[in-house]
Image (tube, helix red, strand yellow):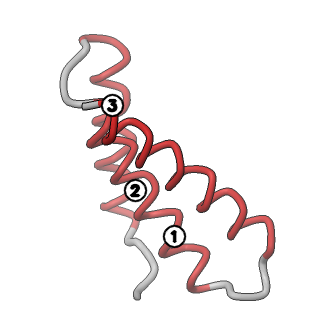
Amino acid sequence: MSRPTISEVSALLADLADFRTRGAGSRAELMNRKAELLERIAAAQPDDVEAAEVAAAARARADELTADG
């Protein structure tokens, strides 16, 4: 699993901004992308407990949103 690129993070941030201002996109899909990026960051820093916890919380929320439809 590779670390996310700056362009991947920038694209997610732009999509989140669009969602907040115009309601564009799917909340579940955005949270899934966010969780994936955070998981990749945590995997690249295995000694960083806080990064792993943040990634796990983001994944739980993304899974929750996906289950809700």
Query: Of all residues shown, which one is farthest toward the left?
Result: 25
Looking at the picture, which amino acid does disc 2 mark?
Val
Q: Relative to the observer, which residue lies in front, 43 or 59?
A: 59
Position of residue 67 measured from the top left corner of the image (x, y, whole percent): 33, 40
| Pointer 3 local density, CA inside 10 Å: few below 14, some 14–19, many at least 20 | few
Count the marks: 3
- Image vertical order of residue 19 relative to residue 7, above or below: above
Q: Residue under circle 3?
A: 68
How far apart marks 3 and 2 lie (CA) works out to: 26 Å
Q: How busy is the neighbourhood of tag 1: few (under 14 within 10 Å), some, or many (20 plus)? A: many
For label 2, the residue is 9
Task: Give the amino acid at mark 3.
Answer: Asp
Q: Secondary structure at mark 3?
A: helix
Q: Earlier in the sequence, mark 3 or mark 2?
A: 2
Q: Amino acid at mark 1?
A: Glu
* Relative height, residue 2 to residue 55 (above, below): below
Q: Give the vertical position of 16 relative to 52 (above or below).
A: above
* Quadrant of res 69: top left
Question: Which residue occupies 39% across, 41% down?
Answer: 13
Question: Percent from the top left, x then y, of residue 51?
Answer: 70, 67
Q: Give the residue pinned by disc 1.
A: 39
